[in-house]
Image: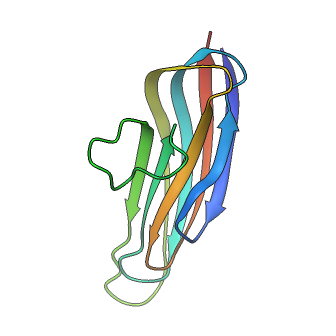
Amino acid sequence: MRTIKIYATGSATGNNVANVTIPSSCTLKGIQYAIDFDAVADNGNFALEISLASATEIAVNAAQQCVAEWRGYNNLVTSGMTLASLVGFFPLSEGLKQGQILYLHAVIGATLTYRFTGVLWLSK
């Protein structure tokens, strides 16, 4: 078992905010993740996606290259700031080939900043 880290931070929607190239054929057994976000406006939200596609498929029906997706939402009833964190392990069994690229995409709504750290657990 070996690991590869993928990290990104931002406050705007973006395709390919981070990517990693798979060094050798393997199986992605899971993603250990930590996501922090802060929002200063009502309806601050995010969707983060790890995908084999170079552009987001977050809002695509029948998307076939998405590996994992996370979402967060903020509902302020008055002005202020909201902070939140998500941590966990997302189990998978995704076969990958040497040289394939995994992309992290982000869709951001309202005023929100995210920080994503993912540790990809790879098995031969």
Check the image and tell me how it is coloured. rainbow
User: Quick one: quadrant of the C terminus?
Assistant: top right
Q: Is residue 1 left or right of residue 49?
A: right
* 22 in relation to 71, above or below: above
* 39 in relation to 50, above or below: below
What is the quadrant of residue 23 in the picture? top right
Residue 81 x %, y %:
49, 80
Q: In terms of depth relative to the viewer, which is nearer, 116 or 75?
A: 116
Residue at 33 percent across and 56 percent down: it is: 59
Outermost residue to the right: 23
What is the quadrant of residue 63 in the picture? top left
Residue at 47 percent across and 68 percent down: it is: 108
Outermost residue to the bottom: 79
Outermost residue to the left: 61
Residue 48 x %, y %:
48, 53
User: Quick one: quadrant of the N terminus?
Assistant: top right
Residue at 59 percent across and 37 percent down: it is: 102
What is the quadrant of residue 66 in the picture? top left
Q: How many marks?
A: 0
Residue at 37 percent across and 82 percent down: it is: 42
Residue 101 x %, y %:
62, 35
Q: In terms of depth relative to the viewer, which is nearer, 80 or 113?
A: 113
